[in-house]
Image (cartoon, rainbow, N blue to C red):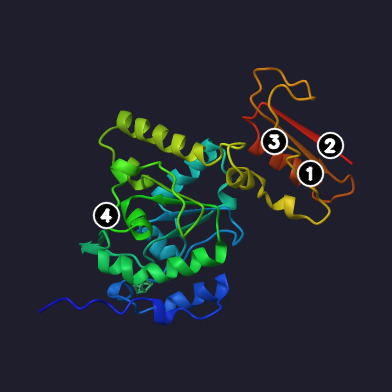
């Protein structure tokens, strides 16, 4: 009997929904068969104003039980890599191409099963709805499933990893491996090598001064949104600037903040955390 294409998620997506509305509605989705065995749908999480969105494949066993994305072993590795790359996890949005866990049972264990093209296509409207609401500057596809959901079935991660393209999803769309691929490396040495490559990929997204999207990413610290808090950069200047920056300093940043701002302690802490690797940061208290 020929396989019938599942109806897809489109009809389950409420019009003009907020992120909270989508999160609630996804629990009723019957766009493909995956809902039938999973505990719950796992929707994306993170600030709806995030500049960067990471898309994984599907929730894993732990995510399925807890109802949150990237909270299992892969998520822990992603947290560590983001921290090593200087990206604050609380400022990024993380989600999956497919919202229900696909697995096969082996005794008491539930083993991950890769979603097929039909399921990826069926679930794509949820991803589109999330991205439409967030409108990030950067989308990072973690692994081949996410990349194929965004770029189409002919995308080859091994060939195109790390390349940035501009498309209808976002101004900067790229791919890297899924953290689970690093965990599956055959030995500790290989895991270390793959981890370092992964962190190097993530660092590209914070290469501030290179373009406005990356700069914006670094500035989306919550304290920065305090109304009393004005923020920069005044400009990313080269070493010959009036601030007498030494040649070794490839770039530096100037921020300013109002003296009475209640956000001042958090703002300063945020600066230290985010710009620890930068040559020079000047903070002016007005
Ligand atoms: S996997 Fe996606 S399309 Fe399929 S039932 Fe779940 S939410 Fe709907």
Q: Secondary structure at mark 3?
A: helix
Q: Is residue 130 above or below residue 224?
A: below
Pointer 2: what residue?
284
Classify residue 269 as left or right of residue 176. right
- Image disc number at residue 272: 3
Q: Nearer the viewer, mark 3 or mark 4?
A: 4
The crowd level at tag 2 (other Cα within 10 Å; few <14, some 14-19, many 20+) is: few
Q: Are marks 1 and 2 in contact (CB under 8 Å)?
A: no
Classify residue 54 as left or right of residue 281. left
Marks 3 and 2, the one that precedes in the sequence: 3
Per the model, the C-alpha gap separating discs 3 and 2 is 14 Å
Where in the figure is residue 91, as x and y percent of width and height? 59, 51
Q: Secondary structure at mark 1?
A: helix
Q: Secondary structure at mark 4?
A: loop
Q: Is residue 11 above or below residue 146?
A: below
> For ligand 1, which image quadrant applies?
bottom left
Where in the figure is residue 245, as x and y percent of width and height? 73, 21
The crowd level at tag 1 (other Cα within 10 Å; few <14, some 14-19, many 20+) is: few
The crowd level at tag 4 (other Cα within 10 Å; few <14, some 14-19, many 20+) is: few
Pointer 4: what residue?
154
Q: Residue at x 59, y 47 (%)?
A: 213
Image quadrant assignment for residue 272: top right
Q: Residue at x 56, y 70 (%)?
A: 19
Seen from the viewer's position, the closer of residues 110 and 286 is: 286
Q: Nearer the viewer, mark 1 or mark 2?
A: 2
């Amino acid at each position: 009997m020929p396989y019938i294409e599942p109806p897809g998620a489109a009809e389950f997506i409420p019009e003009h929904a907020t992120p909270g509305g989508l999160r609630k509605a996804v629990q009723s989705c019957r766009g493909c068969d995956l809902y039938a065995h999973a505990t719950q749908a796992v929707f994306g999480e993170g600030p709806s104003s995030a500049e960067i969105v990471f898309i994984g494949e599907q929730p894993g066993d732990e995510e399925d039980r807890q109802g949150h994305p990237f909270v299992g072993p892969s998520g822990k590795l992603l947290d560590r890599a983001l921290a090593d790359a200087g990206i604050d996890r609380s400022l990024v949005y993380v989600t999956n191409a497919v919202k229900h866990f696909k697995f096969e049972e082996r005794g008491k264990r539930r083993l991950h099963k890769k979603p097929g093209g039909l399921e990826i296509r069926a679930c794509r409207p949820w991803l589109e709805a999330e991205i439409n609401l967030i409108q990030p500057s950067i989308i990072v596809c973690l692994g081949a499933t996410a990349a194929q959901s965004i770029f189409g079935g002919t995308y080859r991660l091994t060939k195109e990893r790390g390349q940035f393209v501009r498309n209808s999803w976002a101004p900067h769309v790229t791919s890297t491996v899924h953290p689970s691929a690093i965990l599956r490396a055959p030995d500790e040495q290989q895991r270390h090598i793959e981890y370092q490559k992964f962190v190097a990929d993530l660092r590209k997204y914070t290469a501030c001064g290179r373009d406005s999207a990356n700069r914006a990413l670094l500035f989306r610290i919550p304290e920065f949104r305090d109304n009393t808090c004005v923020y920069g950069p005044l400009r990313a200047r080269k070493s010959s600037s009036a601030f007498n920056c030494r040649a070794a300093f490839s770039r530096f940043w100037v921020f300013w903040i109002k003296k009475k701002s209640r956000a001042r302690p958090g703002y300063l802490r945020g600066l230290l955390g985010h710009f620890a690797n930068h040559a020079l940061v000047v903070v002016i208290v007005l």
